[in-house]
Image (cartoon, grey):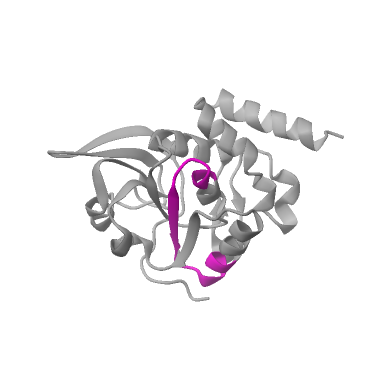
Amino acid sequence: MTSPAELKMQFLFALRSRGVTDSRVLTAMEKIDRGDFVRGLFESRVYEDMPLPIACGQTISQPSVVGLMTQALKVQPRDKVLEVGTGSGYQAAILSQLARRVYTVERHRRLVREAQARFEALGLTNVTAMLGDGSFGLPDQAPFDRIIVTAAAEDPPGPLLAQLREGGIMVVPVGQSDTVQSLIKVTRTADGFDYEELRPVRFVPLVEGLGQD
């Protein structure tokens, strides 16, 4: 039987071998236990590098993808970050270790409630989960230094681009929901936006409106 410590070592080794090399990101992913965010049927697979189902028909992303998206954001200690698609709260909890402030928006009330309870249980005071349509961002809190979208849009959503500070970075999966999507890094410059394609990914589609729950 593999001990929890050995599982954690294997987990971090898998992240490194898949390209997550930023020491701050690895430290955050070592500190925030994915096991705190997965309950029930799939608990035994929590340290495997695979997406797992959660409530409301959503998923908790594959750890290596969480790591690579976080790494691409290049979060700085003074940054204010917006996450669209809270899900289990795992990604936001990792961001909370790297940024000054994290706002995460989710369309399913149940997921917001459960994520906020997890943040409180873990003593994460700089992250706030909110119910809302994430495709519109959070105009009240804009501009943001970093924006991360954990659902696939056909194009980077205009309202989110508008809420990105000059010099800011957004990481978003782009593409049709039923085909391979691309992870895109968008950097806002004085002249507009620079787009960089990072890798193929698969995410649930970004849906407008609130969930029926």
Q: Residue at x 57, y 61 (%)?
A: 115
- Coordinates of residue 200 in the picture (x, y in percent): 41, 36
Q: Say which quarter of the image contains residue 199.
A: top left
- Residue furthest to the bottom in view is 212
Most distant residue in the right direction:
1
Q: Which residues are magenta?
A: 94-113
> Is 28 placed above or below 59 here?
above
Please indicate whether residue 102 sits to the left or right of residue 27 in the image: left
Viewer-side residue, 100 vs 14:
100
Position of residue 131 relative to residue 142, above or below, is: below
Q: Can you see residue 175?
A: yes
Residue at the extreme left: 191
Q: Residue at x 54, y 44 (%)?
A: 94
Residue at position x 33%, y 39% in the image: 184
Residue 150 seen: no
Point 32% across, 33% down: residue: 197
Query: Picture coordinates of residue 85 (x, y %)?
Result: 45, 57
Quarter containing the N terminus:
top right
Q: Is residue 38 left or right of residue 85?
A: right
Asked whether, in this view, residue 59 is left or right of residue 122, the answer is left
State the residue in front, 76 or 157. 76
Q: How many marks?
A: 0
- Residue 131 is covered by the magenta coloring: no
Q: Report x, y in % for residue 106.
A: 46, 63
Q: Is residue 106 magenta?
A: yes
Where residue 18 appears, x then y in whole percent?
54, 27
